[in-house]
Image (spheres, rainbow, N blue to C red):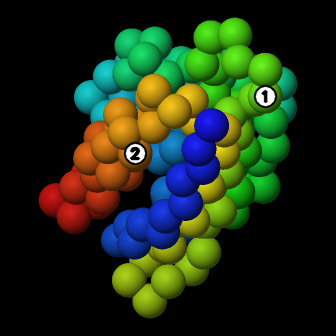
Amino acid sequence: MKDYKKYFIIPAAPEDVFLALTNPATLHLWSGEEAIMSTEVGSEFSLWEGSITGKNLEFITGKKIVQEWYFGEQAEPSIVTIVLHQHQKGTSAELRHTNIPDEAYEDIVEGWNEVYFGSLIDFYEE
């Protein structure tokens, strides 16, 4: 199991980024894919046509998202924590993803950089 941590600068206010990551309609706008998402703790979510699924564990509106991502039958949960900080250019999103299966690590890191946060940053830069 591996962990990944990175900061992303997004040219939008933290409240807007929070909505972009938690509102199904806004998720669809920037990802181009249907999303199942709720800010109800314990609810399950699905992004990118089911390629990312999991359970929502914690929300602090405009500031923090904690999710468990599913990777089959792994013993320890894979936890994603995104903390949003005000930044002079908009938002600094602090990403921490723990317990990534070794065989999925490279794909997950590429997904975070290119698809997930890459698409979100592109959306706000346009």
Residue 82 position in % (x across, y down): 62, 55
In screen coordinates, is 124 left or right of 66? Answer: left
Question: For the N terminus, which image quadrant?
Answer: top right
What residue sits 56% from the left and 30% below the top? 101
Among the 4 quarters of the image, the one containing residue 30? top left
Residue 126 lies left or right of residue 88; in this view the side is: left
Residue 8 point in image, percent of width and height: 42, 66
Q: Which mark is residue 76?
A: 1
Residue 17 visible? The answer is yes
Q: Which mark is residue 109?
A: 2
Residue 90, image x and y in percent?
43, 77
- In front here: 9 or 108? 108
Q: Earlier in the sequence, mark 2 or mark 1?
A: 1
CA gap between label 2 and label 1 equals 19 Å
Asked whether, in this view, residue 101 is left or right of residue 83, the answer is left
Q: Choose top left, top right, bottom left or bottom right for residue 74.
A: top right
Task: Tell me the crowding category of disc 2: few under 14, some 14 to 19, or many 20 or more residues within 10 angstroms, Cα based.
Answer: some
Q: Find numbered disc 2 in the image and state the secondary structure of the residue it sits on.
A: helix
